Image (cartoon, rainbow, N blue to C red):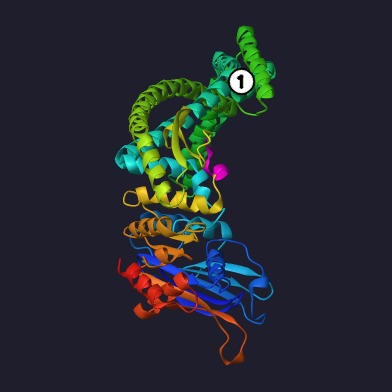
């Protein structure tokens, strides 16, 4: 609900402030007094573009502020959270235009761009101006009207949930199928690579070990010669080193009792003898390990050939990198199999959700088709009351080719304005004033069931008078039972229905420049203002009495 609107330095408004009532607010005033200028200022905080031409005082900025009570407006508060803006019970929306032409917008003192401003304020204010009724072209709004009359809130919510689940599952299924198709293109080649690595039978560091072993075997004869000559010199020569050290050790041992200082040398010689004897044993052991087996050399050479080929093929340098690659290929092949299982499961979920979605959609379709003729009759009847006696309203609900976010239907509001037998979309068949009245009739049917923002009607009663104007006033009054409504009007029958009556006028007091002012009329001032709408600037007593009757009614 709009609690307060403040306008400073806009067009011929130097300063203006209004606090609308929660119900029906009527705005009257002479032509040219500035009623539409106030709407122009309001449109700035609704996201409209502006230029410096709106500034009265070129040295000061133009400021328009709207204070909105939003504590019970869940959709708006959710939108604030999505935009990461402060969520408070009162929302302050401000638009500033500097003399240099720079425009800035703020929501709760946080700067926002015009797209964000427009998105947020569209949830707060519904401004109906002539030739500006986009809602009547909006399929979602038309569907909302049907569902509001059919009381489809719960069923629509369940369908929306199923639709979201169905689309999410379909997206996931499509993604998995694309991934599977991509993998299948490479699956045979990846399987070949994996089988090739598996057949190589490589173990950790296998290629490096084979390379070292083959290199050793290629020098086996020289290795054996060195090992054998070394061991021979130690154990089997004319004077074997092991035996000589043993003999020397025994000689030193015989004098340690008379020469104690020789004991340490004898121990060192004993250690050297033991170490030399151990080396001779290891030389013998190594000699036994040296192989000259041609068959083994052939096997090692084949393993190396295979290993080198794989290393070059995969652009790696070690056996362990090949083993890691083999593991990755194996995991990829397993994942491909798992993806197939996931696709089967998702297909089952999609089928179940589609069946439930179609069932929910059919239920919505049945109720919509039931209320569509009812809405058409009621709106046609209301149009006759508000000055369109030859108009016939029609609601066409057809089946959609695929499930839509709102159901299985496509809805159109059509109008035959003059009993021509030709029904056209409303925005093509009606004038601006007629579209305002059509919107008023449609929203009056759904006022109780639909959440609507603050509704502003600009001269909805253009081109009508008498009983038609009275009926417009009745509809506006009924609509204001559930929603805040502001209506700019030239009809006394409409002005008299307002819970709060604002009067717009020009002021040139003190010889200063002319500015637009607005005030709330007191009861007697209101009688006079409505009487002037009936009988002119100097209303007669009859006009005054008529005005009193309209207000009291």
189 over 547 or under it: above or below: above
| Residue 441 seen from this side | yes
According to the picture, the residue beneath numbered tag 1 turns out to be 210
Residue beneath the point at 50% across and 61% down: 459
In this figure, what is the number of numbered marks? 1
- Magenta range is 423-429
Where is residue 263 shown, x and y percent of the image? Answer: 47, 45
Q: Position of residue 202 (x, y in %)?
A: 55, 19
Q: Is residue 454 visible?
A: no
Q: Nearer the viewer, residue 110 or 537?
A: 537
The answer to whether 239 is drawn above or below residue 167 in the figure is above
Q: Residue at x 34, y 73 (%)?
A: 548
**x and y percentages locating residue 430 in the rendered image:** 54, 46
Left or right: residue 187 compared with residue 256: right
Nearest to the observer: residue 270 or residue 26: 26
Is residue 426 a member of the stretch shown in magenta? Answer: yes
Which percent across, then down, holds residue 460?
48, 58
């Amino acid at each position: 609900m709009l609690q307060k609107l403040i306008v400073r330095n806009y067009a011929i408004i130097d300063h203006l402030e209004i606090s609308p009532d929660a119900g029906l607010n009527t705005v009257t005033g002479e032509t040219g007094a500035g009623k539409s200028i106030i709407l122009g200022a309001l449109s700035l905080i609704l996201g409209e573009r502006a230029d410096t031409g709106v500034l009265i005082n070129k040295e000061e900025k133009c400021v328009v502020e709207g204070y909105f009570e939003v504590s019970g407006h869940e959709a708006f508060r959710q939108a604030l959270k999505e935009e990461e803006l402060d969520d408070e019970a009162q929302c302050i929306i401000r638009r500033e235009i500097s003399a240099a032409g720079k425009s800035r917008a703020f929501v709760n003192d946080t700067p926002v761009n015009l797209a964000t401003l427009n998105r947020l304020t569209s949830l707060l204010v519904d401004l109906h101006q002539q030739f500006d009724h986009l809602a009547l072209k909006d399929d979602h709004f038309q569907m909302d009207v049907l569902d509001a009359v059919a009381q489809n809130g719960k069923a629509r919510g369940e369908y929306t949930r199923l639709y979201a689940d169905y689309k999410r599952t379909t997206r996931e299924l499509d993604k998995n199928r694309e991934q599977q198709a991509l993998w299948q293109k490479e699956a045979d080649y990846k399987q070949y690579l994996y089988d090739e690595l598996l057949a190589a039978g490589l173990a950790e560091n296998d290629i490096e070990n084979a390379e070292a072993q083959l290199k050793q075997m290629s020098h086996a004869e020289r290795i054996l010669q060195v090992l054998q000559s070394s061991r021979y010199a130690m154990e089997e020569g004319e004077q074997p080193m092991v035996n000589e050290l043993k003999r020397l050790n025994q000689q030193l041992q015989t004098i340690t009792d008379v020469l104690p200082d020789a004991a340490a040398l004898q121990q060192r010689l004993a250690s050297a003898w033991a170490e030399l004897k151990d080396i001779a044993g290891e030389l013998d052991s190594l000699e036994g390990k040296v192989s000259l087996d041609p068959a083994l050399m052939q096997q090692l050479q084949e393993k190396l050939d295979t290993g080198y080929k794989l290393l070059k093929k995969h652009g790696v340098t070690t056996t362990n990198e090949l083993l890691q690659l083999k593991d990755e290929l194996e995991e990829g092949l397993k994942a491909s199999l798992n993806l197939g299982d996931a696709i089967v499961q998702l297909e089952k979920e999609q089928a179940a959700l589609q069946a439930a979605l179609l069932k929910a959609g059919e239920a919505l379709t049945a109720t919509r088709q039931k209320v569509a003729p009812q809405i058409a009759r009621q709106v046609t009847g209301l149009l006759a009351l508000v000055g369109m006696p030859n108009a016939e309203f029609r609601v066409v609900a057809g089946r959609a080719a695929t499930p839509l976010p709102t159901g299985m239907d496509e809805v159109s509001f059509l109008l035959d304005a003059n009993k021509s037998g030709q029904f056209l979309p409303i925005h093509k068949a009606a004038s601006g004033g007629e579209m305002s009245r059509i919107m008023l009739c449609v929203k009056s049917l759904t006022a109780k069931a639909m959440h609507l923002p603050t509704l502003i009607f600009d001269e909805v009663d253009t081109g009508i008078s008498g009983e038609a104007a009275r009926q417009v006033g009745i509809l506006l009054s009924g609509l204001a039972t559930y929603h805040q409504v502001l209506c700019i009007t030239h009809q006394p029958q409409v002005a008299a229905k307002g819970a709060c009556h604002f009067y717009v006028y020009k002021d040139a007091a003190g010889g200063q420049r002319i500015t637009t002012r607005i005030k709330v009329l007191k009861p007697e001032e209101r009688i006079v203002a409505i009487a002037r709408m009936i009988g002119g600037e100097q209303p007669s007593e009859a006009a005054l009495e008529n005005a009193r009757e309209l207000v009291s009614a």
